[in-house]
Image (cartoon, rainbow, N blue to C red):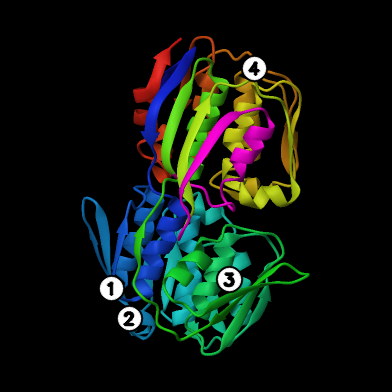
Amino acid sequence: MDRIIEGKRSIRGEITVPGDKSISHRAVIFASIAQGTSTIGGLSSSRDVRSTIQAMLKVGVSIDQREENTVVEGKGITGFEQLRAAEPIEIDCENSGTTARLLTGLFGGAGIPARLIGDESLMKRPMGRVVDPLGRIGVRLTSNNGYLPVEILGGAPAPFDYTLPVASAQVKTAFILAALFIAGSSVITETMQTRDHTERMLVLMDGDIRTRTTLQGKSIIITGRRELSPLSLRVPGDISSAVFFIAAALVSPSSDIMIRNVLLNPTRSHIIEVFQRMGGDIQVERVDEFPEPCGHIRVRSSNLRGTRVGGVEIPIMIDEIPALAAAACFAKGETVIQGASELRVKESDRIAGVVDMVRRFGGRVEELEDGLVISKKMKPTGTEVESFGDHRLAMAASIIALNARGRTTIKGTECVDISFPEYFDLLDAITTVR
């Protein structure tokens, strides 16, 4: 499916965005191993989260998706282990790297034989960062040289002390899930901060979890075999989805939007601070703090200036970089993004994809091994751009297209269903001719 966007547009109005995808994945999985009935409101409608739901259904968890809430009948830690089958269960994770990595930790810790596969894109994404260290703590599993398919065969994992070699909330959560099934205390240390939804959720569920700050970073101590209380949770709006509207409003003249009930977790909302230091007119009203901070965001058109992004900023805004790069095309001065080599192994090579997109619109961009440099304010001309099957590239392209002279065709926009099926309809609803 291709999407045509007419240029020279503004966006105005009040919107909400679907529930946060990262929290939604975790809510479904943790509710499945809780003891009792969990009720989750505002669950993400994304295709990725549907992959996680289908996986839990396949191993025997009861999940009832109603109009307003999703009701999950949790099996408990010991009950979930009893779902072990004589033959491995094949789970199709489709395009969802979160599903694949989290379920590797979950099934590995619980000892449930399973074979994890995915679509063509996911089969090319690295799984060794989860598979190899899980093998070292006693999980029996194999992979295709560090890629899917991954087969969990069983094993007897022991308490562990593991320092994450890469900043990855998915890997961290995979190890936390494994630790929940292990008698004794396990320690996971991250040297760079990543999103902390898992830790917050376990506190809400009365999990035996503690954190401490050391010279090495943050250590998370999990004592396994403790049953989790069921969840009662309303998932806030996804900041990684809202960011495309934020960026579009900042760079499109005469724009003014309000986005309500958006996640403001500091391990996820750093992109707002980056846009503000670029000169962005963004006002934030916090309305809740627990279990996840959330609030309303108002954004008006702004004259942006370039910035530098790198180091510890990258892990807490990795998904927002395509939107940042699109906005930077309209900033005065140079924008440099470095230390983001993880973008090379997302749904596509996002560094190469952003560079291709900017050049097609007539912008000036330099590709780096671990990032890119956008060096001149763009006056884009409508063109044809590729999504490369990547939802975030397709949405980033729409930001530039709104400000181009003439018509732009974005190829393959069905990929947006992976995270935000409603995106283009919502964009159309608030777009005006200027």
Mark 4 packing: few (<14 Cα in 10 Å), some, or many (20+)?
some
Disc with the residue nearer the chain's start (3 vs 2): 2
Q: Which residue is mark 1?
A: 60
Disc with the residue nearer the chain's start (1 vs 4): 1
Give percent across and percent down for residue 408.
Answer: 48, 18
Frontmost of labels 3 and 2 is 2
Distance (Cα) linking label 3 and label 1: 24 Å
Distance (Cα) linking label 3 and label 4: 42 Å
Disc with the residue nearer the chain's start (3 vs 4): 3
Mark 3 vs 1: CB contact within 8 A: no
Q: For residue 7, say whether it is visible.
A: no
The image quadrant of residue 49 is bottom left
**Would residue 81 be found to the left or right of residue 281 on screen?**
left
Say which residue appears at 52% left-offset and 32% top-offset.
246
Mark 4 vs 2: CB contact within 8 A: no
Mark 2 packing: few (<14 Cα in 10 Å), some, or many (20+)?
some
Mark 1 vs 2: CB contact within 8 A: yes
Magenta range is 262-291
Frontmost of labels 3 and 1 is 1
Q: Amino acid at mark 2?
A: Leu
Q: Amino acid at mark 4?
A: Gly
Say which residue appears at 61% left-offset and 47% top-offset.
318
Per the image, is 352 magenta?
no
Q: Which residue is mark 2?
A: 83
Q: Amino acid at mark 1?
A: Gly
Per the image, is 266 magenta?
yes
Label 4's element? loop
Q: Which residue is mark 4?
A: 362
Q: Which is more toward the observer, 346 or 7?
A: 7
The N terminus - image quarter: top left
Q: For residue 415, say whether it is visible.
A: yes
Classify 431 as above or below 46.
Answer: above
